[in-house]
Image (spheres, rainbow, N blue to C red):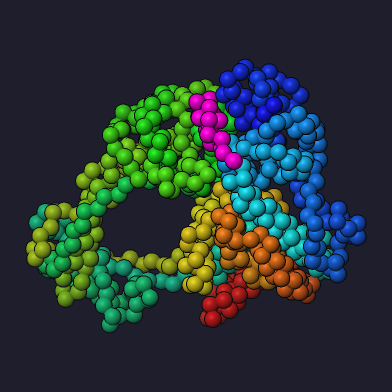
Amino acid sequence: MRLIIAEKPSLARAIAEALPAPARREDGALVAGDSVVTWCLGHLLEQAPPDAYDPAHKAWRLDTLPILPSPWRLAPRPKARAQLAVIRRLLKRADTVVHAGDPDREGQLLVQEVIEHLGWRGPVARLLVSDLNAPAVRRALSRLEDNARYAPLYRAAQARARADWLYGINLTRAWTLVGRQAGHGGVLSVGRVQTPVLGLVVRRDAEIRDFEPRPFFVLWADLAVAGGQLRAWWAPGEGHRLDDQGRLLERAPAEALAARLPGAEGRLTGLESRDRRQAAPLPYSLSALQVDAARRHGLSAQAVLDTCQRLYERHQLITYPRSDCRYLPEEHLAGARRTLEGACGGDATLRGWLAGADFGKRSKAWNDNKVGAHHALAPTGKTADTSRLSRQEADIFRLIVRNVLAQFYPALSTREVKAEFSIAGEAFRARGQEVLEAGWKPLFTTRDEAPPLPPLTEGEACRVADAGVEDRETRPPEPFTDASLIKAMMNIARYVDDPAIRRTLRDSDGLGTEATRAGILETLVTRGYLARQGKALRATRLGDALIASLPEAVGRPERTAQWEQRLSAIAEDADAPDAFLDALVGDLRTLLGQADAGRMRRALAEARGVEAGGDSARKAGKAKRRPGGGRRGGAGQAAGKRRQRSRS
């Protein structure tokens, strides 16, 4: 008997339906001929708790840290015992086993740890399914691989699970205990990904809170030229007070020049024109979809993930959603027309976009060299029954199909023009863009583009029809939203100060994974460290205090991003799990030595002050300013000092 173990029931049903023999239901399994398909329910096993290694660890005490399991143990999850018993019974009858976990690191761990925990020693094949439609599953069944090929991926996932346990259990216990000493009664959860994400928000909030707006001034002039009229902007020279971005800091010079400009004549002294072609955005990875869906439809990252899971499992309209890839296999290109015609059949908007597609085109999206264990999100070709889709499901499905359809549209072709005028001995600059061919752009936006400049000839005359000075202010950074925080997690190198580390992180996977980022944000909200204010995600008093009380490195992204690099190396069989975990234990001992109740007490007190000041400032529309500086106080002040130290 061949036993196929799927990651979840929906995948098990899809596999059973693709087998040659009709399937019948048994307890916890589906039987089809000589094959039996059973399933996990997500993770059936979890890392054993500390007291499983030593009953003394049931009590939380600083003098027992760090807790270092040896050998490592797994324990059944509370609701998993019945299904584990089913798999154990089926394994006793099996001749061969097929691992049918999701095609990623976590999917490899989830099924393989069950197979090993239950003591199976026979052969194991690997089934990789990224599309639940029957033809795709049948193709996957015809391409079974040796599961041994994925042993490095399993070791990486196992090392990740053990490292997260070591880091989370030990630091959470340490900071909870010093928190109690400082008067905080709850658990203070510390994690290798969630805490650096919280740190990003805390530091952004501090920058906003500490920001002191600076006035600057711009001078515009409406110019009449032979081909029409345009607006140009004064480019003040070095003889004026300018900031590091070339903005004018005094109003008087702009006012004096504006008074002389009406009716003044000048000449076009420089003209630069450049044609650009921009290919369509690639099909989506999950994180890229979460960013766009948050901006376009106001959906949280978790809502997008949940919607994608329904489109994949319940409706079978899209391929595997938890993908970090934005490319498609080259073999999919031949069937793309048929797939997209099926996907677009039930939606008027999609049918309209389909009509403009040219299937003779081939974009860079079709690239086997860029496809790993899974490919970009794509439609399966099944026609959507819109009466069975929620509005959210329809919106997300439309986005996914659109980005694949766009690969069969021409490039966006534009002409960018920069013009410089000399008027009254001063330089004025204007920029414009002309759309030569809209290409894929209408699928993405209906907004009008900025008007192009009128036809210009270098050396032609101009005359000032009107001029004016505008008072402006520098603006603080925007608070994080679901979209911008997911994007920050994807592009974490931007938030790293050390140039050497920043260079090495540009090619890494960032903070978290496609499968975990949404859950991390929701966990931080649920645990009271972040709060949603409209679309914004802001740190709470408790979130501020936790980051202020921790060693700076724990709340910054460098460590966990470098972890991901080490885990990727393990997955590629280029690094050893033991070396990674040994280095982590040494790091943990150093961090635990910095747990300090006094620092925690100060952080909690300072954060209370910031929260009180912040609330009153928001109500009044302004904040109290310290002489000679921006708004300071509490955790924001501590964060500001830490930023200064990190840059010195």
Residue 562, picture quadrant: bottom right
Residue name at image x 16 percent, y 53 percent: 454
Residue 299, picture quadrant: top right
Q: Residue furthest right?
A: 56
Q: How far from the left and from the top, in percent, is residue 591?
A: 72, 71
Q: How far from the left and from the top, in percent, is residue 14?
A: 59, 27
Which quadrant of the figure contains the N terminus?
top right
Which quadrant of the figure contains the C terminus?
bottom right
Q: Is residue 230 magenta?
A: no
Q: Nearer the viewer, residue 101 or 145?
A: 145
Magenta region, residue range = 128-146
Q: From the viewer's perspective, tell me whether residue 259 is left or right of residue 9.
A: left
Q: Nearer the viewer, residue 359 or 644?
A: 359
Q: From the viewer's perspective, tell me whether residue 78 is left or right of residue 280.
A: right
Q: Is residue 219 visible?
A: yes
Q: How far from the left and from the top, in percent, is residue 416?
A: 23, 56
Q: Is 295 drawn above or below residue 254 in the view shown?
A: above
* Label tally: 0
Residue name at image x 88 percent, y 58 percent: 54
Q: Nearer the viewer, residue 378 or 468?
A: 378
